[in-house]
Amino acid sequence: MAVDLTTRIGSLTLKNPVLTASGTFGYGEEFSDFIDLDRLGGFIIKGTTLHAREGNPYPRMAETPSGMLNAVGLQNKGIDYMIEHIYPRIKSAGSEIIVNVSGASPEDYAEVCRRIAERTDIKAVEINISCPNVKQGGMAFGTTTSGAAAVTRAVRAAFPGVVIVKLSPNVTDITEIARAAEAEGADAVSLINTLMGMAVDVERQRPCLSTVTGGLSGPAVRPVAVRMVWQTAKAVKIPVIGLGGIMDGRDALEFILAGASAVEIGTANFIDPQTTVKVIDYISDYCQRHGVDNVSDLVGVI
Amino acid sequence: MVKKTITDFTIKSSTRLSETYALLKLTPADGSEVTPAMPGQFVQVAVPDAPHTFLRRPISVNFIDRSDNTLWLLVRNAGEGTSRLCSLKAGEHLNIILPLGNGFSIPEAEGDFRRLLLVGGGVGVAPLLFLGQALAESGREPEFLLGARSRADLLELDEFERFGKVHLSTDDGSAGVHGVVTQHPVMHDPGISRIYCCGPAPMMKAVAAIAREREVECEVSLENMMACGLGACLCCVENTVRGNVCVCTEGPVFNIKQLTWQ
């Protein structure tokens, strides 16, 4: 019997629970030589802001044990460029496109979402209140309940589709931030964004990154992410999307069993561009092996 | 554009060229043809059994030999990942994504570019062998200017000599001109109409400065640190006249007019 991988996030129905994490999958087309994009549950495109951003100076990346630090700083050409030049190329993809949105103020976030609603058929946005690599906005909103609430409220008023709020792990209690987003009408939360970290080039006696600190991703962060997903799934009624160091199907199931309705594949895309489809196949095989008809039956069994 | 592939290769031979360099010759494990690549393009190699090497390693295409269907990679031992690559033996396997990046431009117009100088330093000589072959096959006369610390670090000289005249410089004077490549007279030869350069950043900047001053076309190949190699992560950016661009997709080869090196 075929396993039902259908996953619901608010009013959005995904063909399977596997998404790509923003900033690790470009606009999807970078991976079209390696995978059939139609197979994905959806892909979350690069963090987009109201105006173009050049990002941070090089070096922006440092390899670390079982992971990497990045300090890209939301380099992107702005929402209008995305809508006019990139969206027409990718809109025929057979999986859901979700735009990751960032801003320096709640009004910025709302305006980007308004333009997406008015000028595209995109049904969902992921609100990034957790980028550790920008001076203004970003993580500042994701580390207080009032900041998370203010951004979610502004976006909720501007965007009729599905609003996913992406949470920062750089907090004492992630569940209270999740509850603040839920209370303001978020349809789902995704977690975790990168953990703030730092690496030093000891020979040159300088930080490895131009920005000194950056965001840690990769399997190094996975146990932290699984724990936070488990805590958050118990604290909110809306779906939780889990991410953080998923390298294969087994890792994805850790998140699903801990309470994630869907997962995002991030850094693994850099190492094996076919990770997403391998994870989908693994989840399907796993369900068959365990006599599970519907993947949603596995969500949060722990 | 050639479709990128993820291919398992078998190592046909691994030759230690010096203490720090190895030349790997690889052929697809399934017997298929090596995916075509252009000179200047690179590959992303997954390093097996290296627990501290999380990301793939970007390595230039040194050569593709159609006669025996091999991809050549010249590897400098610069850390755990590349040390592991240098120690691999014939018969072992490597998973490689290729081809990546843009490649050098081959001049089209007959006669416009008669003498072309290919300047390489250290492991930066790697892509110039493949480029030299392409230029020679298109009827150009490539000349190579290869720089190294000493004679023992000059790599693949017999291979370069197949495609053009080879000029040398060494820091210690053990071969060719005593000094760095920019001190070699051929760098200042007015007959040179175009320069291709790959090597350490200070060397490329010095070569670019001469090319700019003499108004000679010049392309350089950058080796900014990369994660994905596919234009997705935006980590390897170089600041250019068009702002920050990915070296992995818009490079690694840049005309120096695109760069903000002045």
Image (tube, rainbow, N blue to C red):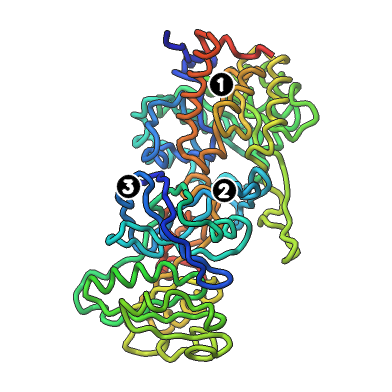
Side of A46 where A62 appears, left or right: right
Where, quadrant-wise, is the N terminus of chain A in this rendering?
top left
Q: Which circle marks residue A271 in the picture?
A: none
Q: Residues within 10 Å of mark 1 (few under 14, many from 20)?
A: many
Decide if residue A48 is in sight here. no
What secondary structure is marked by label 1? strand
Nearest to viewer (mark 1 / mark 2): 2
Nearest to viewer (mark 3 / mark 1): 3
The amino acid at mark 3 is Gly
Residue on which the image places disc 2? B55
Give the camera-side residue of B33 and B238: B33
Where, quadrant-wise, is the C terminus of chain A in this rendering?
top right
Residue on which the image places disc 3? B31
What secondary structure is marked by label 3? loop
The amino acid at mark 2 is Leu
Marked residue chain, label 2:
B
Side of A132 where A288 appears, left or right: left
Give the vertical position of B223 relative to A263 (above or below): below
Seen at 69% across and 36% down, the residue is A221
Marked residue chain, label 3:
B
Mark 3 touching mark 1, by CB under 8 A?
A: no
Q: Give the quarter of the image for residue A300.
A: top right
Side of A287 where B34 appears, left or right: left
What secondary structure is marked by label 2? loop
Separation of residues labelled 1 and 2 (CA atoms): 25 Å
Give the camera-side residue of B109 and B71: B71
Where residue B245 appears, as percent x and y from the top left, is 47, 55
